[in-house]
Amino acid sequence: MRKPGKTLAPAPFDADEVRRLAEGLKALDGALLPILHAINDRFGHVDERAVPIVADVLNLTRAEVHGVLTFYHDFRRAPAPRHVVRLCRAEACQAMGADALHAELEKACRGGPVLVEAVYCLGNCALSPAALIDGKLYGRLDVAKVLELART
Amino acid sequence: MTQRIYVPRDAAALSVGAHQVAQAVAREIAARGLDAELVRPGSRGLFWLEPLVEFDGPSGRVGFGPVRAEDVPSLFGDAPKAPSLGRVEDLPYLKSQQRVTFARCGIIDPLSLADYEVHGGLKGLRRALEIAPAEIVAAVIESGLRGRGGAGFPTGIKWRTVAAAEGAQKYIVCNADEGDSGTYADRMLMEGDPFLLIEGMAIAGLAVGATKGFVYIRSEYPHAFRRMAGAVETARAARLLGPDVLDSGREFDIELRLGAGAYICGEETSLLESLEGKRGQVRAKPPLPAIQGLFAKPTVVNNVLSFAAVPTVMAEGAAFYRDFGMGRSRGTMPIQLGGNVKRGGLIERAFGLTLREIVEDYGGGTATGRPVRAVQVGGPLGAYWPDALFDTAFDYEAFAAKGGMIGHGGVVVFDDTVDLARQARFALEFCAIESCGKCTPCRIGSTRGVETIDKILRGERIVENIDLVRDLCEVLRDGSLCALGGLTPIPVMSALEHFPEDFVRDAVAAA
Ligand SMILES: Cc1cc2nc3c(=O)[nH]c(=O)nc-3n(C[C@H](O)[C@H](O)[C@H](O)COP(=O)(O)O)c2cc1C
Ligand code: SF4
Ligand code: FES
């Protein structure tokens, strides 16, 4: 299973907004994932305090909500830094030097406002190495390009 | 007549600057006061040429690529600064293909239903509405179509099971999780011809008596998700989806769902759990999803490309589709070429061409210019093959006979700098990261495997540790509920079998 994200400074939590988001989607079949996505999108992460609210709205136990929240890599448990580079570490990108690129990026970004994360294939395997930088897909990347894109 | 100029809005094309190129084209049209219209299709799948710009001309579409935004003005003059490709359809890479599923991708405006119909869209659904559900199922069986998600199970047989199952509510679920590394055909299709998927799912609904469909799209594909959302909305407005599909009195609608970053959710039962709002843990089979699937109702789960092949079967007949291919692999396969390759892209061909044709003729060798050393076919659970196996025909059985699999059709090329011991290590690491946690060998054994290969890489007791890896692979193969644990041994063992020298290389260097 994937390791949880790094712990970072807390972001403002709004219980009413969480409830509103959950209420708005609860009519969907299997509403929990869409609700967690909505919270994650809105706040940049899913605060622990959102769990009992979502559980209440969906009539689930906290343990159930917590179990789902922690299973999926997408749901952040803590706020993300300003910029996120989700670098593809899968085979087609490995074949084009993604491992070395990752090592260089880690070094260049340590302690800074850019978080480098691993992701496994972005469907851009003919234009490797690929990454999602702040949610946008890029291909044919090298260190200089990633740093330029992540810092702008 | 207004001239049409095409710049793809495919995520891969955008990833190398297609948006800036499109903006430059729009500026040029305005500045020159041209009677021209900018169209944003999907990609042709000639990725080494992206961003590719095409101009409508008297003899067809002529192209330039790759184009940089700053070169765009020159394309409107006599001295284009980007490589001129002539008629795009005449490029050997494209001309030699048999584009059936991808016939419209890169050509039409993906969100124009009118464009879709002009290019043959909806013929299959109209035909399906004229005949009995059992006839639809019979045609799909006769076409020989096998699931394109990886396992290659006959699509029509699955549909027959769901059609026969009792249940007031049944579901159609499209697996658009496309987690296999080296694959992108589902993404391209959803972005470049989304109505084709909608049409295929609607036909499935008619065939088995399901009124509701879900498309489960991986969250790594935000662009495809948005495109599909636009297409579903347009389809509803045009009454292609909804309570009265094309005025037939039959109902079918589609809801989109976003995955949340878990490779295992591509496995169909895990995907269903995820759709139900749960942890994506694999279910034991039986019951088959066809009998008890989503919310325990009879459910068709198919890959994007499986659904997308069906409109052709309905419109052109089962024989048309079946006549492509070889042996028990019928129809065409969208092969996705990537990694360290000069000309990476989508190659849709009848089954039967060789891996060598794919890598050498289409691919043109490696991007780095070094010799090809290994090719992995079929995603992260696929085998690593050396040159000696490149003459194998692209066919389910031919690949299986040599210990490989074609899977979802991904072909990843590596040059001679690759270290297969490291690739084997990665296969086990990936299994550990993505394991759903249900089986001990998959959850724990994979991590032991990584540690053992690390020892081999350090040159510690190599012979004994290689034996240990082999034993672990056996345990994984025999003690796993699903193919994540069950097939991880394939990349590992193929690396050991075909590239044994890599497992002693570091030890030799250290000595
Ligand atoms: C670990 C694992 C991952 C899978 N990932 C996918 C996937 O991303 N997309 C897909 O269509 N099928 C995937 N499959 C295969 C599905 O379980 C299932 O066979 C397929 O969706 C059925 O559709 P088809 O018959 O049209 O191929 C995966 C299977 C396993 C074991
Ligand atoms: S083999 Fe792995 S992924 Fe598959 S069910 Fe078992 S633990 Fe889950
Ligand atoms: S392997 Fe990196 S984008 Fe597919």
Image (cartoon, rainbow, N blue to C red):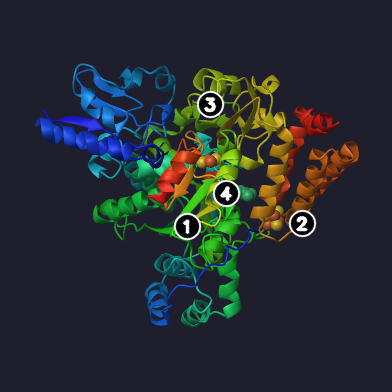
Q: What element carries label 2?
A: helix
Residue kind at label 4, given as amino acid type: Glu
Residue B361 position, x and y percent, is 52, 17
Which of marks 1 and 4 precedes in the sequence? Answer: 4
The residue where tag 2 is placed is: B444
Give the foreground label among 3 and 1.
Answer: 1
Between marks 4 and 2, how big is the CA–CA gap?
Answer: 28 Å
Residue A142 position, x and y percent, is 49, 37
Q: Mark 1, chain letter?
A: A
Residue kind at label 3, given as amino acid type: Val
Q: Quadrant of ligand 2?
A: bottom right
Q: Is residue A92 visible?
A: yes
Between marks 4 and 1, how big is the CA–CA gap?
Answer: 12 Å
Q: Do labels 2 and 1 share a chain?
A: no
Between marks 3 and 1, how big is the CA–CA gap?
Answer: 34 Å
Q: Do labels 3 and 1 share a chain?
A: no
